[in-house]
Every structure is written in structure tokens, then in C-alpha cells.
Image (cartoon, rainbow, N blue to C red):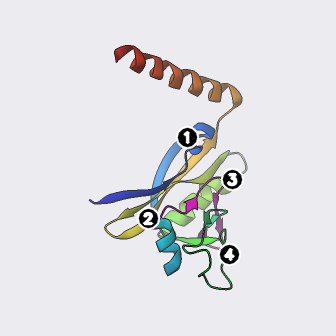
């Protein structure tokens, strides 16, 4: 399996507690594929929503590949349709759609797998402030241990 990571949502694992991950395809235009391969994209502040039996990536920014050479109707942060099975969409909609679940869908990374662009999405629960502090403490402890072992 040949995988090359194109972009990664670094804030996702700090802000959310990941419950489950799912791989999906993403519907893109040709110049968006080139921009992704060049690393001109960001997942900061993006999320995933389910609407009318379809699933969409919202607020993900894919900049123009060439600043002066893009279509007139180009919108960098347009909604992009994700490609997964109807069964998975209905399952995710039932989990996220309930008021008491507290779960949301977020994008983790965009990568190439066998010359196809895929997106890894996660079913996640938002962390509380004390959980974030605990994550910072664990990270700093790991750095201290690594520094001492050098």
C-alpha cells in the first residue's frame, strides 16, 4: 500500500478525543488535486456534515495552484463531497445526529493512496480544558524523557 500524506490537521488530536477513524474519497477538480499535491491546503477549522444522505467537507481551504491562473468561479473553501457508502453515511448520521451523543465528524488528514486522494475522517468528542492540560503534560514529559535519553 503506497501512501503519501499531503496535509494533516495538527489541532485535531489536541482539541478532540478520537473515537473511530474512517477512510473516504473526496470529490475534487483537477486544479485542486495539483494544489493538494503542492501542499497548498489547510484543514484548520474544517468539519464534516451529513445532509440529505450525503456527506460534505466544510471550510477546508484549498488555495489556487497558480495564483493568476485559476477559473473565475474558483472558491478556495467551498464544500466538497466525500465518497463513502450509503450504509456508512446513514450509520454516521444516526450517531452524530442524536442530541446526547456529543460526537462530531472532523477531518484528520488528506493523503494519496495508490494515486487516489483520500481523506481520513474521525468520529470525535471534544476535550474539556483539563483534558487538554493533561495532554500538554504528557507531551512535555515525553520530551523531557527523550531529551534525557540523548
Please tell me how crowded label 1 is: few (under 14), some (14-19), or many (20+) other residues with Cα within 10 Å: some
Q: Which residues are magenta?
A: 37-55
Please tell me how crowded label 4 is: few (under 14), some (14-19), or many (20+) other residues with Cα within 10 Å: few
> Residues under labels 4 and 3: Cα distance?
32 Å
Q: Nearer the viewer, mark 1 or mark 3?
A: 1
Horizontal side of residue 51 vs 92, given as left or right: right
Q: Nearer the viewer, mark 1 or mark 4?
A: 4
* Secondary element type, mark 3: loop
Which quadrant holds residue 6? bottom left
> Residues under labels 2 and 4: Cα distance?
21 Å
> Residues under labels 1 and 3: Cα distance?
23 Å
Instruction: Say which residue label 3 marks.
Output: 98
Between discs 2 and 1, the one toward the N terminus: 1
Please tell me how crowded label 2 is: few (under 14), some (14-19), or many (20+) other residues with Cα within 10 Å: many
> Residues under labels 2 and 1: Cα distance?
19 Å
Between discs 4 and 3, the one toward the N terminus: 4
Instruction: Tell me: residue 69, above or below residue 48.
Output: below
Q: Nearer the viewer, mark 4 or mark 3?
A: 4
Q: Can you tell which mark lies on residue 118?
A: 2
> Residues under labels 1 and 4: Cα distance?
28 Å
Instruction: Say which residue label 1 marks.
Output: 13
Mark 1 and mark 3 residues within 8 Å of each other at the beta carbon: no
Amino acid at each position: 500500500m503506497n501512501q503519501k500524506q499531503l496535509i494533516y490537521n495538527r489541532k485535531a488530536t489536541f482539541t478532540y478525543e478520537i473515537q473511530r477513524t474512517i477512510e473516504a474519497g473526496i470529490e475534487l477538480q483537477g486544479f485542486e488535486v495539483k494544489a493538494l499535491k503542492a501542499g497548498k491546503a489547510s484543514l484548520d477549522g474544517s468539519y464534516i456534515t451529513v445532509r440529505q444522505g450525503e456527506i460534505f467537507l466544510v471550510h477546508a481551504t484549498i488555495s489556487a495552484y497558480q495564483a493568476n491562473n485559476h477559473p473565475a468561479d474558483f472558491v478556495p473553501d467551498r464544500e466538497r463531497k466525500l465518497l463513502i457508502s450509503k450504509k456508512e453515511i446513514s450509520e454516521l448520521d444516526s450517531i452524530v445526529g442524536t442530541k446526547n451523543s456529543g460526537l462530531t465528524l472532523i477531518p484528520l488528514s488528506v493523503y494519496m493512496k495508490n494515486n487516489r486522494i483520500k481523506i481520513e475522517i474521525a468520529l470525535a468528542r471534544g476535550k474539556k480544558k483539563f483534558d487538554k492540560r493533561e495532554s500538554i503534560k504528557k507531551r512535555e514529559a515525553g520530551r523531557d524523557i527523550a531529551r534525557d535519553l540523548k
